[in-house]
Amino acid sequence: MTSTLSRPAPAPASAPQAPRRAPSADPWHWAVTGASLLAVLAAASSLNGVVEPWTWLMPVLRTLVPVLLAAALTRALGLGSMITALAGVLALVGALTAQFFPRQALIGVIPGPGTSLELQRLLAQAEETVVSQVAPVLPGAGIFLLVCAALGLIAIVVDLLATTMRMPAPCGLALILVMVSPAIVKPTGVGMFAFIVTVLAFLFLLATAQWRENRLASGGARASSGFAGRSAIIGAAALAVTVILPMFVPGFNSGAFPQGARLNVWGNATGLNPAVTLGNDLRNPTGFGRILYSTNSDNPVYLRAVTLEDFSGRRWEPDERNGDRESDVAEIGAEDGVPGAPADSSPVFTRVSTQSYASPWLLTPYAPVGISNLTGNWAWDPANLSILATDGGSTARQQYLVQSRSSALTREGLGNIGPSDTEAVPDVFAALPDDTPEIVRTRTEEITGEFVNPYDKAMAIQSYLRGPEFEYSVEAPVEGGYDGSGMDVMARFLESKSGYCVHYAGTMAVMARAAGIPSRVAIGYTPGSPTGDTEEGPDGVELSEFVVDSRNAHAWPELYFEGVGWVQFEPTPSRGVVPTYAQQAFSPVGPRADDGNALNPSGLPGATGRTDPATDPTNAATGSQGAGSEGEATPATGLLAIGGVALLALLPLLLRTVRTRSRRKSVAITDVSAGSAGAATAAWAETTEIAGDYGYPLEPTDTPRTFAGRLAHEADLAGEPASSLARLRNAYEREEYAERGAAIGSPGAVTPPVPFHGSGRPGPSGTPAVGTPAVGTLARAVSPPRWDDVDTVTRALRRGSSWSTRIRARLFPQSLLNRFRSDPRD
């Protein structure tokens, strides 16, 4: 009797799935735009120290928020990428107009008549700030206009890359652009705080962008593919590169990036005000801006560029006085209030070769009476004898001859001079602003109160500043936040009693005015070091050659004595030369070898056979620190280099480990809750990549069965490894080819469309061929994948490989050449 098989009942209908979100619906772009805003603001934190800290924050927020809000709204309306970029640019123009051109604006945000003229004025103001102020510069509309415009454009680029183009990784280049200016201007580089917050913000942007991609790919459902781990690896790679790169790129100096490293792209001091770069020059131990000069002077020669007279305001800068200048520098007359040269005085000749030094202010000994062989148009100021280029020229690669005069001053002669007439010099040399700190006045009264003559008062001030309480340091002002000049800076210097020449010179000049002595601050270079060469000067005069560079940059006070003129003093300890008339027996610091009486052979290092470390010119940038400080930095630099190289070497291993852990996690979830989508695919992807790392790559024409059969045969997998490989393959086939909700072999299941491709090769040791479909393999439900099977196959591959293959598979896995993906069939 033949039994009749009943027709199988139809498979139960699967539960209706929730409709997926339309691809155009993308509310998650708002999160990426917000992350872009945070990233740009984090990079902008490096501007602290370029401008006064956090003064830039509100103008930048008032610029970036409207720009990114306009871009996000346009994107939400689905108007296209070009319209989004255009909306961002228009919003930037409107935000800048509302902030910086409110009087010229139409309805508050549209540039109106007069905007171009106001723009030119603000740009000129910004240029003046850049060339005439020392960082951090004072907050001003011109400099903030440039900052806000630049950051607004960078924010548009970052938002387009991360949100519209969905390429967040290149945004790091835009963020680096923000930090270029601080790396150039700030003496300590970008700074660790700004660097760390920028890196964290960039990683957050990467993670947010990947989270958005996962949401879009899953139709809004929650998904995870290890994007946070990948972001951390990218950040580690960026950190390693930034640590190592400055050690091999010319221009980075003074430490490891970002703290202590300064990108020096100019190579020499430039700008309208030599005082701008003075502090940075002194902190640069390499020495640049080389200048040669030859002279027949019997006294050490200071090369003087400008003087600072106006002590009002928060920054001191030279007054150009273009309307009062005389154009003929071949014959320079006497300075205002200064008598002419004595009839019996012999001329001093100095030939100067500027080489790479570039400045619109000419370097000359004081006091010049004539200059020859200059190229360009130059004019001199009768108020201070400063010489300025009037045609936009500079001192670069000039070689000129200066004739000057010097007075034979004595302590006794200066001590017999009484207080000067108030009308002897212009008021600017004697005026004290109303905001002069009380500590300046009280300390001056304590020091000079018992003296009457200007000379005695001046010597009391100089002796006080050169006393044991004060210390020369180029770092203390930076750490204490009083670098540069200004009345508040002088007050903080008197409290901390540590600083460099600008602070000593400025403080003595201010205290001299408080004591009734007209004063000013000269900016230039100390005498430098002799080269040992000589050359012939005018009328056969022999000129001895000296060299100076940025390490000799200096500031010193000049005080006015009626009937004599302007007299130089030296209050800075361990720097410069104390003139003979200003020396006292109890002076604690003597002349330095390089800047002392270098014309006297007994003052040279070779005369004694030894050099005082405190006077070594290579240590001029660090004050009293010896050569040991440089040696102490070498091990740290070496450790950083070794650590960076090690991090780069281990980077492939870290990337591979992160990917493996992400896949292990997805399979572990399956062990608890069977049926989680993607688990078998993740396990199979890990298996095929591990096999490729050990020399058994997945070919483009391979099906799961042909690959499994070839791997079992070539790697000699038998026993438990072969069974594990078969289970991984079966789970993958089921997940990839079976209908969702139906087990393979159950009614309604679909047989996987995989070709045979010769997969019936016998397995090793008599085991069934892994690639051969066993009867009922697809006719029964396959258990969820287990990570133990992946580990079993991995251990078998490792045991069957040579030690070199094992090292290559761990440290340089071939699977990293493939892009991050979950589907191995690509």
Image (cartoon, helix red, strand yellow):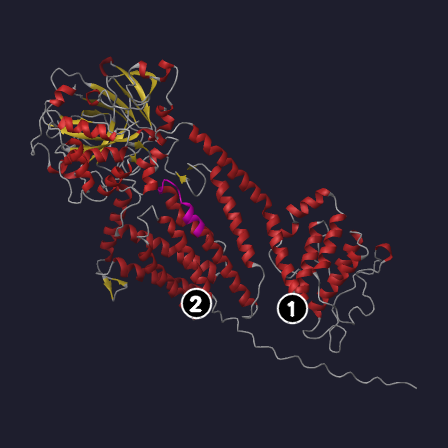
Instruction: Please state which of the two labelled residues, at mark 1 or mark 2, is closer to the viewer.
Output: 1
- Residue at 17% in and 28% down: 458
Tag of residue 92: none
Residue 403 in the image: state x and y as whole percent. 20, 22
Q: Quadrant of the N terminus?
A: bottom right
Can residue 397 be found in the magenta stretch? no
Q: Is residue 415 visible?
A: yes
Quadrant in which residue 310 is drawn = top left
From the image, which quarter does the C terminus lie in? bottom right
User: Which is more N-terminal, label 2 or label 1?
Assistant: 2
* SS class, disc 2: helix
Crowd around label 1: few <14 · some 14–19 · many ≥20 (10 Å): some
Query: Left or right: where does residue 235 sit relative to residue 118?
Result: right
Which amino acid, by three-letter code, is at mark 2? Answer: Arg
Q: Which label belongs to residue 75? A: 2
Between the residue at mark 1 and the residue at mark 2, the CA separation in whole angstroms equals: 34 Å
Report the number of numbered marks.
2
Percent position (x, y) of residue 709? 78, 58
Of residues 253 and 97, the one drawn nearer to the viewer in this rendering: 253
Which element is circle 1 on? loop
Q: Nearer the viewer, residue 638 or 234?
A: 638
Magenta-drawn stretch contains 192:
yes
Q: Is residue 663 left or right of residue 622?
A: right
Nearer-the-camera pick, 150 or 223 = 223
Which range of residues does the magenta coloring cover? 185-197
Q: Are marks 1 and 2 in contact (CB under 8 Å)?
A: no
- Of 280 and 504, nearer the camera is 504
Residue identified by numbered label 1: 676
Return the x and y of residue 797 as percentages of the image width and height: 74, 51
**Which residue shows up at 7% across the image and 34% down it?**
422
Name the kind of residue labelled 1 in the image. Ser
Q: Is residue 377 visible?
A: no
